[in-house]
Image (cartoon, rainbow, N blue to C red):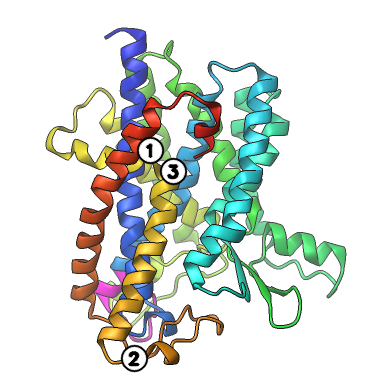
Amino acid sequence: MSASASYRYRISSIDWLRGLIMMIMALDHCREYIHINAFFSNPLDLEHPSYTLFFTRWITHFCAPNFVLLAGISACLSGLKKSKSQHSWFLFTRGLWLIFLELTVITFGLWFDLHFSMVTLQVIWAIGVSFLLLSGLLWLPKPVIFSLGIFIIAGHNALDKVSPTSGSLSQALLWLSHQPGPLPIGEGRLLLNLYPFLAWTGILLTGYGLGALFRPQISSSLRKQWLAYLGGGFILVFIFIRWINHYGDPSPWQPQSSFGVTLLSFLNTTKYPPSLLYTLMTLGPALLILSVLENRSMGFFSWIEVYGRVPLFYYVLHFYLIHGLAVVIHLYQGISWKQLNFQNGTAGVMPAVGLSLGGVYLVWLVLLAILYPLCRWYGRFKKRQTHQLWSYL
């Protein structure tokens, strides 16, 4: 295989994994908007555990961290044909663009609130801020950037118990970087930061460093080997640290009423912000998948790559479709339009309305079927465009 062909194939493997991640991501958001009472309950509740509901939520834990990791790898690959200055400017402006989208288009899709009473910072915001920071770090060697990412992932949980003075600058910085929560931004308005950027930046910088493995001059066998070592190593370190139960997650596991529920407790790591253990648990298997995908055709399952080629298009569109379907289900089940309240932080979702978990899975499959031709069309359309503007979309 030629260097150029190998390079294209490796991009395909990354897009395939991204596509799989985004399919699973849509399941989580279908559950949140459409499963009965999902907005008002915790699917990971261990006092009244449901294995089906728990693992429906747990499997989606793999989405956000690997979405960010692959964004870092893609950021590295996007700079192969750019000067450092050009690449820095691209990452800086793309970061600003992603933050703008989060605050406007994506926030509206989440809440359908014309008054924007709840502005939400999620994964696109975290990637945007990380791109801004990465744009200033590009002149460092890739191994240094990778090491910085690993250092942040490993060390940020040391901030878990920090309690700065209320109203201080340090409290604001900690809220932005590490401790999630709401912040009043005016009468009747909240800025809800679900994705403090620090840990996510660590994941993206790690991905950027890993991007060096995907350069055309790196042999396929070496790349496969390194991805396997890293993936397996992450999983083993997760098991070891989680078993010790002293560091790496603010919620230690505890013995439960049965072995099965104890296992749920062991796997129930913290996403907001992503703890060291959460990150190891989710990135390790993804790196192993990338290793397995190396030089392998996906055959029948190659269609999954279609979703992964247009991640931003898919991400924005799937929120609008899922939220719109939730509204339709409310109306079908007898809720009048006047009863729907989009300004109370529940996105118009009401208690005791929605579908069973089986119905959620059915809606999810229908959603993927709707998104597939749209993503395929947009991917082909975007591929024909030559203006640099399209690299932001």
Q: Which residues are magenta?
A: 44-55
Which residue is drawn at the image coordinates 59% and 47% (left, top)? Answer: 98
Q: Residues within 10 Å of mark 3 (few under 14, many from 20)?
A: many
The amino acid at mark 1 is Leu
Determine if residue 236 is in view. Answer: no
Q: Earlier in the sequence, mark 1 or mark 2?
A: 1
- The reply, left or right, for residue 9 in relation to residue 266 is left
| Depicted 84 relative to depicted 131: above or below | above
| Depicted 138 relative to depicted 17: above or below | above
Q: Secondary structure at mark 1?
A: helix
Residues 40 and 260: in front is: 40
* 303 in magenta: no
| Depicted 28 relative to depicted 16: above or below | below
Q: Earlier in the sequence, mark 3 or mark 2?
A: 3
Discs 3, 2 touching: Cβ within 8 Å: no
| Residue holding disc 2 | 335
Placement of the N terminus among the 4 image quadrants? top left
Which residue is drawn at the image coordinates 38% and 90% (left, top)? Answer: 351
- Separation of marks 3 and 1 at Cα, in angstroms: 9 Å
Residue 139 lies in quadrant: top right
Discs 3, 1 touching: Cβ within 8 Å: yes
Q: Residues within 10 Å of mark 1 (few under 14, many from 20)?
A: many
- Mark carried by residue 287: 1
Q: Position of residue 4 (x, y in %)?
A: 36, 11
The amino acid at mark 3 is Phe
| Residue holding disc 3 | 234
